[in-house]
Amino acid sequence: MKNLKLQSSENPDFQSILARRLSRRGVLKGSAVLGAAAVTSSLSGCGRSDGYVNPNRSPITFTEVPHGLDTDVHVPEEYDYQVLLRWGDGIFPDSPDFVPLKQTESSQLKQFGFNNDFIGYLPLPLGSNNSDHGLLVVNHEYTSSHLMFPDVRSDVELDREQTRVDIAAHGLSIIEIQRSRKEWQVLKDSKYNRRITPHTPAVMTGAAAGSKRFTTYYSNDGVKTLGTYGNCAGGVTPWGTILTGEENINYFFMGELDGHPEEQTYRRFGFDGKARGSWGTYFDRWDLTKTPNEGLHMGWVVEIDPFDPDSKPMKRTALGRCKHEGCNIYITQDNSVVAYTGDDQKFEYVYKFVSAHKYLPEQTEQARKHNMRLLEEGTLYVAKLHSDGKLNWLPLVFGEGLLTQENGFASQADVLIESRKAADLVQATPMDRPEDVEVNPVSGKVYVNLTKNGDRKPNELSPGNPRSYNHGGQIVEFIAPDDDHTSDEFKWEIFILAGKPDEMVTYYHPQTPEQSWLACPDNCAFDNKGNIWVATDGAESFGVADGLWAIPTEGEYRGLPKRFLRTPIGAELCGPYFSPDNRTLFCSIQHPGNGGSFDEPQTRWPDNSLNLPARPSVIVVTKKNGGVIGEA
């Protein structure tokens, strides 16, 4: 395989420091790392020239799915997959059938939404580990109108009624499901089933709640708010709620920004006044000229109680405002509560929140009420990585350091509303699109998926981001001292530098076969053994389908990727989530056939019918013999 040299850095010693640190980990046995000149050999995880690795020696056992690109989903030969939910499927007893040429807002509100992303499985009853019966909570991140409607090429072309359908297809679906023999079923008559949309009443909580900057025509107190959308990844809390991250919300807004009272804040978030869709064309709420503060209601982590269909989604402002990919909770040995989240844009940051109060593990109603307020009060931190492997968590607290009135902050509410500006001022480390940030439940290590950053120049290399023009992405580990995730100082390591080895510098296990590489890590999940399962978004730029890879995180085969699933053309793999017994794996197949259109599709998966378009879907993967996924 061809090896490429790392680009030069502003710090001339950074390459040699990185090379020495990687070699000390012992993953690349026999590598002679002598300094910057040897970085290439230490980072290119190539073993035997024929790519051979004995699959029976790896702790993860299944027949690997080869690279490829076609119109179908592929899983290992000893596995099956079931399409559980498709866009347009009814989720209530009175839901109408899906008729793609006669879509209406009222029908879509009773059907499964579009572009499913994050999946969370919560066992029933609450507090159990039932792997055969539970609630499935699914994000609907955004829509692809060219795949939804005939004769539509872009989101801005929708008429008013199509726009109503488009809005209704966003948000979340909460659905009760149960396994009967091998098949999973949707229980349409469940009291829990619910659609949450951009119009659902919600509330702001935490230090920013009540801010005058939230005042709108429907929120005179800065506490009331409406809906959630742009929901990408998320997390399941130990107390049985869902956390969903509002990500690319700037795309939904139009309006003049020059001279706008929030111009600086909006522009720092990526608003440009040019909507990617039609919402603001027909509804004043999404026109910042007419509803100036509406954009500040978005960009939060939202907590939802799926066990109470009458509950309102709660926007947790204490976790800061940014393009949240998702949010995941870790409970330390002393019951401290820590939440991790990434800001999914180039050169943005990784955040940590430490609650002011402790988790109550008791399975009582009173304990759950207490736990459901843990994300209202605490301290928000942002990560700064150093070239010696240290990581500092920098507090974002009003009045400390540069976070003062002199720099435009009048309160903690302002710090939270403008988290990006606050992180800029404390000089946090800009990362290569931080997406899923999750804690390995076995080791306690934090894994940060950095999808890619093609804009990083050779003079912009930094700890954790060692490649310029980074099209492959990487996974970085954060290691808390003695499992103390509340500590202000961690360590960090490169786990994988992803990408195609003959096109860029990569870092995998030395016995990685030539066809096992991955690119653009996005979401992830962990099995009960602590192996990481990595979903990708962007592999098609390398000529292969996206999908899911299983990778050991410890031991002799740490960093050895193995492809488990391949998506159809145009699709990405999102939201992998295991049942508690690891015998069921839920996955989202998002925007299949994205390069085509409703009229000229690249694929008609999953129905493969000439009367139906491609449909984003949730699939359920199980082993044919009913065994544990990934085990012999």
Image (spheres, rainbow, N blue to C red):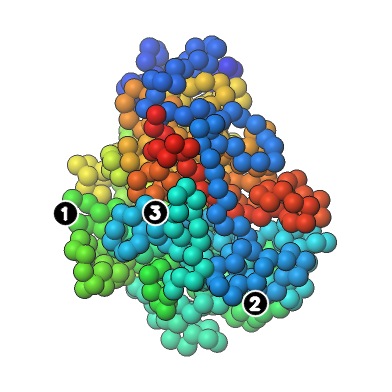
Q: Residues within 10 Å of mark 1 (few under 14, many from 20)?
A: few
In the displayed structure, 460 sits above or below 579; it is above
* Residue indicated by mark 3: 132
Visible residue check, residue 313 = yes
Residue 106 marker: 2
Residue 536 occupies quadrant = top right
Q: Where is residue 254 in the image (x, y as percent from the top left)?
A: 67, 71
Q: Does label 2 or label 1 sit earlier along the sequence?
A: 2
Q: Specify whether 580 is left or right of 562.
A: left
Mark closer to the observer (3, 1): 3
**Residue drawn 64% across the image and 46% down it:** 571
Residue 128 occupies quadrant = bottom left
* Residue indicated by mark 1: 334
Residue 158 occupies quadrant = bottom right
Mark closer to the observer (2, 1): 2
Q: How crowded is mark 2: few (under 14 residues within 10 Å), some or many (20 or more)?
A: few
* Numbered disc total: 3
Element under disc 3:
loop
**Residue drawn 59% across the image and 37% down it:** 74
Amino acid at pointer 2: Ser
In the displayed structure, 252 sits above or below 178; it is below
Pick the quarter of the image with the N terminus: top right
Q: How far apart are marks 3 and 1 (CA)?
A: 32 Å
